[in-house]
Image (spheres, coloured by chain):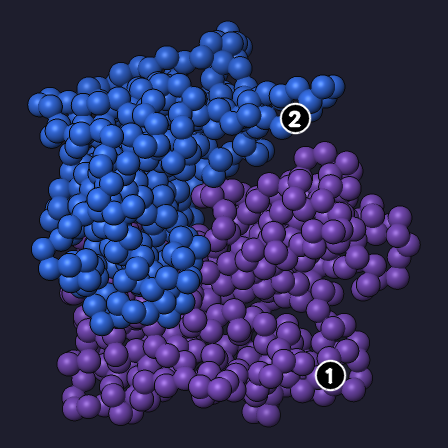
Amino acid sequence: MINETTAVPAPASTPRGEPLLSVRNVSKYFPGSHSGLLGRRGTPIKAVDGVSFSVDQGQTLGLVGESGCGKSTTGRVISKLLEPTSGEIRFNGRDIAGLKPREMKSYRSEIQMIFQDPFSSLNPRHTIGTIVGAPFRIQGVKTEHGIKAEVQSMMERVGLNPEHYNRYPHEFSGGQRQRIGIARALSLRPKLIVCDEPVSALDVSVQAQVVNLLEDLQSEFGVAFVFIAHDLSVVRHIADRVAVMYLGKIMEIADRDTLYSEPLHPYTHALMSAVPVPDPRKERRRERILLTGDLPSPSNPPTGCVFHTRCQKFREELTDVQKNRCRTEVPVVTENAPGHEVYCHFPAPRAGLTDLLKTGAAT
Amino acid sequence: MSTTLPSPAVRPDGRKRAFLEVNDLRVHFPTADGVVKSVDGLSFELERGEILGIVGESGSGKSVTSLAILGLHKGSNAEVTGEIWLDGREIIAATEEEVRDLRGSEMGMIFQDPLSSLHPFYTVGAQISEAYLVHTKVSKKEARAEAIRMLEKVGIPNAPSRYNDYPHQFSGGMRQRAMIAMALICKPRLLIADEPTTALDVTVQAQILELIKQLHDELNSAVILITHDLGVVAETCDKVLVMYGGQCVETGPVDEIFYAPEMPYTWGLLRSMPRMDRDRQTRLTPIPGSPPSLINVPSGCVFNTRCPFTDRVDGDKCRTVHPNLEQGATPGHAVRCHIPAAQRQEIWLTEISPSL
């Protein structure tokens, strides 16, 4: 295992002008359940359907949306834990979408992952030293003072006591376990880390500690993050650019400040209007856009714009002619401002919402 | 209902009892490592029509308190002392049968995890109508009709056919709705919701909170909402109780807690949240350290090991003397802190509030 020769030469540094990660039209379909005569395959579940975005070196892209919108699947496709059905994933100037597991191995040290649940993502039979040191052993990386010294300095860096090298995961709290996961992801100094809801399971005070740690590590090591979360406040804090997903598609993508100050897609409006803010007076005055019904099935998504079945704008503001367009025509991207892309036939800011988020001063 | 329970509607001091009164509640669990003091001297009152939010980190005793009110520690090795008065009846001294009678009919509970709180072998409808059958003398047919009516009320589309579905056929939001239907079918006058929306998306959370508020208005029930999300509290509650290390460290009307909090722990909670309604901060301000051990509770103030303001108190008082819960700036607002009241308000206005 150790020092196995790699099939693919180590990737060169990013060519100038090209983003670190560039995802073009990537889809991931899961086969539907077998049904009917002769065990024919059912309709595929379109978990991710034609998603495009890019991430620059040292930057953070936030991926937000409800559960079932395909944000985690997108994260897993990027890190090649899942094979994309179609599309192109350019990492460091090379398309890695079609690489075989063997060829992927050298990329694994460059693309790492932090998982949501700090309880199930650490092997309970292994000590912290084994867990954080595993990437070195698997990749056959030699370190100057041995793996143990390297692991202990990493533990110290993420705020763990290096003397706990021989302890088991169950001896740590949720916040500490998440730090172990971070140390493991960072141990080989990757260029990109896919963080799948890394702070969702933590208490607010601990969550703030971990968010600060991730930011510190990003500026120290220059690593880029794809930060998957459903908490829009946390994403606003940590991300440079934010993509909003619904039913496997991107609805809106923009720089953080643009997206949070002038969201244009009705789905983004609904999401933002649902986030409770710790201010009782604002809460009493605010208008909430309640989405009716549940998420449609991704094996049989609505025609036209996938969001039209739950869209408040569609229900309340549009004329029949306009509605017909939503029902039949898949929206193509509208670039409102450079870098602000919206997939909606009728994008527009929503007055009451932006007022609340930006100024809404307490009286 | 039961005559064996003592039912004085007035307190020893002559004041009328509140609908729900918790006096000096202690829940201790003896373990091999020592006694875990999950709840240690908690008191509060709640009237019908009010929504109380209990906030705190994991392990602060929020859920253990709610289980004590429901009498669910009976039969376990927990040592429960103090008094819990629900509508003139005392729960801690009551027998298991008496509490079981109250549970479901007088008090309902919505649990955090709807998947593990619904039985996978029985249909959702059967589980909802069971509660109704146990507490009212009706036929199965009537119970079924009532359960369907409840499912419709909580917004399950196509309720009559969904009645026969199993829990795994429901989505997360729908399961939580089914839990609410189950908790409310007997129109309880006290509803305890333990992190009812933590596992849900924000959009579904907004729907569920809206539903709880709506049903609360309709039934005029008292509601206890346990959560760690201060945004949810601001949106839903009338009163707030902040718990830390098994104790109440601050309590008051919702506006007092959000606009004039006086306890450093509450400040810490407010500061550590990223907020969408304010300018983005370059850095979050977490509360340093981690929650205290409930076996070796810190001497003096429970929060002293993580409190950045202990230097504002003369001498070693924070580490040696346990502070009492004393009235803050306004009646109904109580704070457990050694910093003098005037100085606390000063710190909030000059140091904490501007940095939020």
In the image, is B42 to the left or to the right of B8? left
Residue B267 visible here: no
Give the residue displayed 15% in from the left and 50% down from the top.
A142
In the image, is A157 to the left or to the right of B241? left
- Residue closer to the observer: B318 or B333: B318
Give the residue displayed 31% in from the left and 20% down from the top.
A88
Q: Is residue A142 above or below residue A203?
A: above
Q: Colour of chain A?
A: blue
Q: Which residue is mark 1?
A: B95
Q: How many marks?
A: 2
Q: Is residue A201 above or below residue A9?
A: below
Q: Which residue is mark 2?
A: A34
**Disc 2 residue type (three-letter):** His
Which quadrant: the C terminus of chain B?
Answer: bottom left
**Disc 1 residue type (three-letter):** Thr
Image marks 2 and 1: residues in contact by CB distance under 8 Å:
no
x and y percentages locating residue A37 in the rendered image: 74, 19
Give the residue displayed 11% in from the left and 49% down from the top.
A220
